Structures are given as C-alpha cells and as structure tokens.
Amino acid sequence: MPNSHRDMLAARHARLDARLGAELKRPAPDAAILRQLKAEKLKVKDELSRIH
C-alpha cells in the first residue's frame, strides 16, 4: 500500500509541475495561480519525503 500512495503522490507532483510550467510559459502568468501551484507542489514534496 505505501508504494501505491507514493506513486500517487509522485504522479500528482508531476502534474503540478507540468501545470506550473504551462502557467510560466503564458504571456502573463497569474501570480496567484503560481503561488497556489507552488504551495501544493511543496506540500506533496514534503509528504513524499516523509514516507521515504
């Protein structure tokens, strides 16, 4: 079970990273969206590091 949870978190982290990259490529990135995505990505990263 822990592996599937870790895999789920890793996939979520990758999706957030892709969304963050897409937002950064926009002509005028939305600062609020960037903050939200970065915060979510950090939470997922922290959770991943706790289960390793």
Image (cartoon, rainbow, N blue to C red):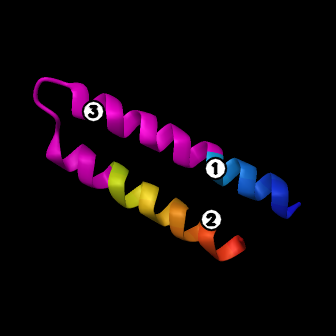
Magenta-drawn stretch contains 30: yes
- Residue 38: name its quadrant: bottom left
Residue 12 drawn above or below residue 44: above
* Rendered residue at 31%/53% (across/down): 36
Q: Specify start and end residues of the magenta stretch as a single range.
A: 11-36
| Separation of residues labelled 2 and 1 (CA atoms) | 7 Å
Q: Secondary structure at mark 2?
A: helix
Q: Is residue 28 left or right of residue 50?
A: left
Q: Amino acid at mark 1?
A: Ala
Q: Earlier in the sequence, mark 2 or mark 1?
A: 1
What residue does disc 2 label?
48
| Separation of residues labelled 2 and 3 (CA atoms) | 24 Å
What residue does disc 3 label?
23
Outermost residue toward the top in this view: 27
Question: Which x, y percent locates residue 31?
Answer: 16, 46
Pick the quarter of the image with the N terminus: bottom right
Q: Earlier in the sequence, mark 1 or mark 3?
A: 1
Q: How busy is the neighbourhood of tag 1: few (under 14 within 10 Å), some, or many (20 plus)?
A: some
| Separation of residues labelled 1 and 3 (CA atoms) | 20 Å
Magenta-drawn stretch contains 29: yes
* Rendered residue at 12%/23% (across/down): 27
Which labelled disc corresponds to residue 10? 1
* Rendered residue at 64%/53% (across/down): 9
Q: How busy is the neighbourhood of tag 2: few (under 14 within 10 Å), some, or many (20 plus)?
A: some
Q: Earlier in the sequence, mark 2 or mark 3?
A: 3
